Image (tube, rainbow, N blue to C red):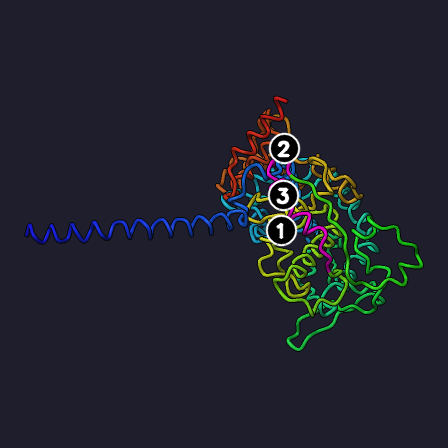
């Protein structure tokens, strides 16, 4: 037994150095791979690359998006009122994850939503007079923006490889482009000289380009960089471009000098215009990737907030001939784009369009959203919810005693309740980012 142990020990002494060398080689290989991939995931991104101003912007617009979804649902109801229990069917559209209660979310904004109970004790929701006036104002602004939105939709069709895009996909851009709620039913038929609805063999509806417009085949970047006369614009044919993209790096990021050469090389590289035929490009080539950056830059330039949910971009990979790993490309060019990781759906910003938390150029629809956001939240004491006018005081008293779990009539507002803690109540659905970092940023700004 002792001899066997000595033999095994000798073999072990020979094996250990080999294993150590193998481990070193494996560890070195793993570290190399790790160093190449960490910057390609938003969750692994260095905090120095985070732009906290834009993270805050994302959080604000998340709230506005939820409010708008509820207002649109109410607008489609016959009397513009709906039982709270029926709103549960629209939870995915509202994008309010459980365990948050829709009724609690509505009670945070009494200037926009009003709650009532009927004779059976069912809690209903409607819009305040102020909210209804805001909706009318929005309709007017969307109508005024209609021609510009039609131009942007047409330019998207011009950039697409087949000059047509499924209507279901364009719907994703509805709010971002300022399109009306009846976009696919009525609005698309208002511009027959630009596009039309066609059906494929599988009964899928497409929006198809009717006529090419040379005046619109010029990128927003070209318009800013080059002063082109009307004669040249009319004769313009999309082809190779050699324009640099505006860069804006996070203020805390100090390692730009390490990749300065690569950035300069990328900026000087020629690329095919988003409006030129890209069928001949090789996927994965440098020219292919730079054209994809140009397309994303153009799409973000079309949006009213210069921001898009990344899911919406990935839906158009085939139509716009973009790479499969689109997120990696966005993260790689973080001087041009910024990806926010707030919530379960990421957003991508066009960094040049923002100064701090503010859009540099605000359109009427952005100003309208800011007005809507100013009415979110409440500061005050207990608020009494009114009942429908056909209920007597006695009936109301009886209903008030009904404290069902899901439809309680009593609403308590704390003295310090503001939009700020409405935001914090919604932060619970975020599992990609440390909340402490944002909180620390708030504190640092308060101190400064």
- Label 3 and label 2: CA atoms lie apart by 13 Å
Task: Tell me if residue 368 can be seen.
Answer: yes
Asked which secondary structure carries label 2, the reply is: helix
- The image quadrant of residue 314 is bottom right
- The image quadrant of residue 247 is top right
Asked which secondary structure carries label 1, the reply is: helix
Query: Where are the magenta residues, as a range?
Result: 250-271
Whichever of callouts 3 and 1 sits on the residue coming sooner in the sequence is: 3
> Tag 3: Cα neighbours inside 10 Å, few (<14), some, or many (≥20)?
some
Residue 350 lies left or right of residue 411; in this view the side is right
Image spot of residue 173 (x, y percent): 70, 55
Residue 184 vs residue 158, the one in the foreground: 158
Whichever of callouts 3 and 2 sits on the residue coming sooner in the sequence is: 3
- Label 3 and label 1: CA atoms lie apart by 21 Å
Image spot of residue 364 (x, y percent): 80, 43
Disc 2 vs disc 1: Cβ atoms closer than 8 Å? no
> Tag 2: Cα neighbours inside 10 Å, few (<14), some, or many (≥20)?
many
The residue singled out by tag 1 in the image is 330
Q: Which of marks 3 and 1 is in front?
A: 1
Task: Tell me if residue 70 can be seen.
Answer: no
Image spot of residue 47 (x, y percent): 55, 37
Residue 267 vs residue 261, the one in the foreground: 261
Residue 393 lies left or right of residue 154; in this view the side is left
The residue singled out by tag 3 in the image is 62
Residue 96 falls inside the magenta stretch: no
Numbered label attached to residue 419: 2
Can you say whether 12 is above or below 371 in the image?
A: below
Residue 255 falls inside the magenta stretch: yes
- The image quadrant of residue 325 is bottom right
């Amino acid at each position: 037994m002792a001899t066997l142990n000595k033999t095994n020990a000798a073999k072990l002494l020979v094996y250990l150095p080999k294993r150590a060398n193998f481990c070193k080689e494996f560890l070195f290989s793993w570290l190399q791979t790790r160093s190449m991939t960490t910057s390609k995931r938003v969750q692994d991104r260095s905090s120095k690359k985070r732009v906290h101003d834009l993270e805050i912007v994302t959080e604000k617009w998340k709230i506005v998006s939820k409010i708008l979804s509820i207002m649109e649902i109410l607008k489609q109801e016959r009397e513009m009122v709906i039982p709270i229990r029926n709103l549960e069917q629209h939870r995915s559209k509202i994008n309010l994850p459980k365990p948050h209660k829709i009724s609690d979310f509505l009670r945070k904004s009494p200037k926009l939503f009003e709650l009532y109970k009927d004779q059976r004790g069912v809690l209903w929701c409607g819009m305040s007079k102020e909210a209804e006036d805001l909706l009318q104002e929005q309709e007017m602004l969307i109508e005024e923006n209609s021609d510009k939105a039609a131009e942007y939709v047409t330019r998207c069709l011009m950039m697409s490889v087949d000059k047509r895009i499924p209507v279901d996909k364009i719907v994703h851009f509805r709010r971002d482009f300022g399109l009306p709620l009846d976009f696919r039913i009525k609005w698309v038929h208002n511009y027959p000289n630009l596009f039309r609805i066609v059906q494929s063999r599988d009964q899928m509806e497409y929006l198809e380009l009717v006529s090419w417009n040379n005046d619109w085949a010029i990128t927003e970047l070209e318009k800013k960089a080059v002063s082109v006369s009307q004669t040249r614009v009319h004769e313009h044919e999309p082809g190779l471009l050699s324009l640099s993209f505006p860069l804006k790096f996070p203020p805390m990021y100090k390692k730009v000098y390490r990749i300065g050469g690569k950035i300069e090389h990328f900026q000087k590289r020629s690329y095919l215009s988003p409006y030129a035929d890209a069928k001949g490009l090789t996927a994965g080539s440098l020219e292919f990737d730079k054209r994809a950056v140009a397309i994303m830059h153009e799409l973000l330039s079309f949006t009213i907030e210069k921001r898009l949910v990344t899911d919406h971009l990935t839906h158009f990979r085939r139509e716009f001939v973009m790479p499969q790993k689109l997120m990696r490309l966005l993260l790689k060019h973080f001087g041009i784009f910024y990806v926010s990781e707030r919530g379960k759906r990421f957003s991508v910003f066009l960094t040049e369009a923002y100064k701090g938390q503010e859009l540099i150029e605000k359109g009427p629809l952005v100003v309208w959203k800011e007005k809507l956001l100013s009415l979110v939240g409440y500061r005050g004491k207990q608020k009494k919810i009114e009942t429908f006018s056909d209920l007597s005081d006695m009936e109301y008293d009886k209903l008030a005693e009904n404290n069902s779990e899901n439809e309680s009539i009593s609403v308590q507002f704390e003295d310090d309740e503001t939009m700020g803690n409405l935001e914090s109540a919604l932060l619970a659905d975020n599992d990609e980012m440390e909340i402490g970092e944002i909180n620390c940023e708030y504190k640092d700004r308060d101190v400064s």
